Amino acid sequence: MQNGLYAVAAGIAVLTCLGAGIGIGIVFGKAVEGIARQPEASGKIMTTTILGAALAESTAIYGLVVALIILFVKWGA
């Protein structure tokens, strides 16, 4: 029973990738809208977009790390 709960907890931790994917989609969608409205500001918009995408992706990496810790602490010990 306990092994199943660890697997469920790791699966829930990996679901942070879903939020990161949605966040990155929103960031780049709004960036494209902004560049379409003001093409001369594309440099500033892309710089901010890359920063926003990196912040959104870091949540997915944290979720993956938490899932791996959950799995390896249980089955590694």
Image (cartoon, rainbow, N blue to C red):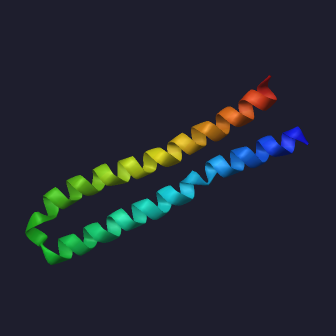
Query: Which residue corresponds to the image point at 49% horizontal and 60% vertical from the top-left?
Result: 21
Q: Is residue 74 above or below residue 57?
A: above
Query: Which residue corresponds to the image point at 41% horizontal and 66% vertical from the top-left?
Result: 25
Farthest right residue? 1
Q: Quick one: quadrant of the N terminus?
A: top right
Q: Is residue 62 left or right of residue 40?
A: right
Q: Position of residue 28 (x, y in %)?
A: 33, 65
Q: Is residue 34 left or right of residue 70?
A: left
Query: Which residue corresponds to the image point at 34% horizontal and 70% vertical from the top-left?
Result: 29
Q: Quick one: quadrant of the C terminus?
A: top right
Q: Position of residue 71 (x, y in %)?
A: 73, 36
- Which of the 4 image quarters holds residue 73? top right
Query: Which residue corresponds to the image point at 78% horizontal and 30% vertical from the top-left?
Result: 74
Q: Position of residue 20 (x, y in %)?
A: 48, 56
- Which of the 4 image quarters holds residue 42? bottom left
How many numbered circles does the render carry? 0
Q: Is residue 69 above or below residue 62?
A: above
Q: Position of residue 63 (x, y in %)?
A: 57, 44
Farthest bottom residue? 37
Q: Is residue 8 above or below residue 30?
A: above
Q: Is residue 25 left or right of residue 50?
A: right
Farthest top residue? 77
Q: Is residue 70 left or right of residue 49?
A: right
